[in-house]
Image (cartoon, rainbow, N blue to C red):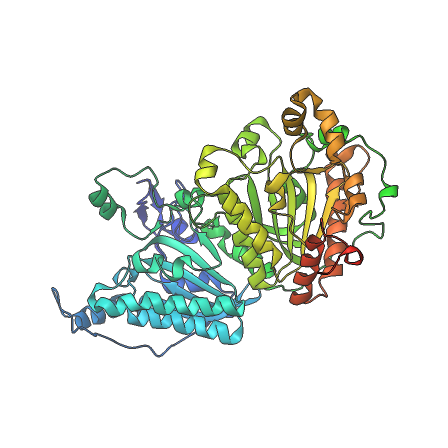
Amino acid sequence: MSSHWLLCPGCREMVYGRAFERAARVCPHCGHHAPLSAPERLGRLLDEGSMEPLAFAVPDADPLDFEDSEPYRERLRRTRERTGLDEAVACARGTLGGHPVVVAAMDFGFMGGSLGTAVGESITLAAELALRRRTPLIIVTASGGARMQEGVFSLMQMAKTSQALAQLDQAGVLTVTVVTDPTYGGVAASFATLSDIIVAEPGARLGFAGPRVIEQTIKQSLPEGFQTAEYLLEHGIVDVISPRDRLRPTLAALLSVATRRPADAPVADAPEPAVITDPGALPELHPWDAVRAARDLGRPSTLDHIAMMTDGFVELHGDRRSADCAAMVGGLARLGDIPVMVIGTQKGGTAAELVRRNYGMPAPAGYRKAARLMRLAAKLGLPVVTLIDTAGAYPGLEAEQDGQAVAIAENLRLMAGLPVPTVAVVTGEGGSGGALALAVTNRVLMCANAVYSVISAEGCAAILWKDPAAAPRAAEALRVDARQLLEQGVIDGVVPEPEGGAGAAHAAAAALRRALTATLRDLMPLDAMNLVVDRHARFRGFGAVPATERKTA
């Protein structure tokens, strides 16, 4: 352990060596994360005493007999002597938080972590071991790109490793990438960004082309923080940014839910009724009063409900294409003893958050994010819970240019065929297709003071009555309240709200948890085919002529 003073490459402040090493090489002044070697990565991630190094048989290749300032074989020999590594990746199996895993950790100190045949083969063998053992695969990336000394054979490793991850997708095995600084080129454009979940260290850079190449190509200056983890989170590429001291707990939480490991202490729900299915048991409420109650800013938001009714929630971000819509949130969590993927619209309770969350109206990127998380749930066999509180999908110019209608339509189709139990709850406003894009589920519930409608009462009044002031009349005509929707069979049950309304947040969340756990336990015994058939029958029936009344040709 170093006892001398060091200069932080991030802030240029002096750092005491021993303290720097104890902090896992993270600067105490600016939080800069300095590189770790592959063996150090494995040691920090895996539980003490659990690590079993994987000595894969990989080629010692020089397919081009390459020589620049020195022969490639000589460069390899010297690098091995200097680093003590055989190649730019080290693999091991063990446990992380008690969960079995296979880990492949790259090392930038070995020829810039470049992707050659030996690295590609090791990553592929690690993936194949994870496949045989049905064990999650964690890949820690650090690379400048493909290894030029191996020419097109290096390029082929991108395809080979991508195939290996595709096999894990088909088998339902969780994959996680931990992006460290830097990760570029062929690694970024293959296995690094194909994982189910991408976790990045603060400030880690990820991209296909490096910033100098981009600036030279486009002849423009790049924005501040371009390609950093923070930039990529905002632009929908990264799921989670985790400081090094939080990385193990974050990964352990993900593994706990994604592997469907039983909870250590299942939560017992109270024996009181969880869902009201008899409309007569609900008080009559004027639909306009329901609209006003549903919009009350004192109602718990989706994130409030998640925080109060679940354990171990890890929020996942981004559509992996262009953006992270703040109006749509989701992630892995435990609902009592049931691991779930929970997704919902988020309005916010303050003026500033309402603006930041776009008043809970998702953009296309929000629906694409929801779709990505639902596909992940299907892969891992996790039930999907959606919480809906939105006036509707965002109707702006950029949303239309980005394909808002297509994003909603694709969610409707995707949800219709999900092979896992699905439950939607309208917790506040359920507005139009923007709400339905999260509600094609086996069971649809509503909170007692929520509303669900094809259009807002004001919008209907303006179009049909030519008078927005006729909104109460429109709400009554549309029958938007929970009691009438339950009578019509549009919803399957109503979640009672505590005295004083949903503003009694903890009581509201407890009631919602009871309703969801009871509903999911009814659905979980069904297999994938019956879940899809059940869902299809539910929605096929709306507007259909009863079989007894149909006439044959």
Q: Is residue 51 visible?
A: no
Residue 469: name its quadrant: top right
Q: Is residue 167 visible?
A: yes
Report x, y in % for residue 269.
Answer: 79, 53
Residue located at (28% from left, 65% from top):
155
Q: Quadrant of residue 510?
A: top right
Query: Measured from the top left, where is residue 88 in percent x and y?
Result: 31, 66
From this viewpoint, which residue is outermost toward the right? 280
Q: Quadrant of the C terminus?
A: bottom right
Q: Residue furthest front?
A: 553
Query: Where is residue 364 shown, x and y percent of the image?
Result: 50, 43
Query: Residue 407 appears at what percent x and percent y?
Result: 51, 46
In the current view of this chain or complex, which residue is farthest to the bottom? Answer: 57
The residue lying toward the viewer, choosing from 439 and 344, is: 439
Q: Is residue 478 left or right of residue 246?
A: right
Q: How many marks?
A: 0
In the image, residue 101 sits, relative to residue 132, either above or below, namely: above
Residue 347 in the figure: left or right of residue 480: left
Placement of 465 over or under 358, stated as above or below: above
Q: Residue at x 76, y 28 (%)?
A: 289
Comparing 551 with 361, the one in front is 551
Residue at 21% in and 74% down: 62
Q: Quadrant of the N terminus?
A: bottom left
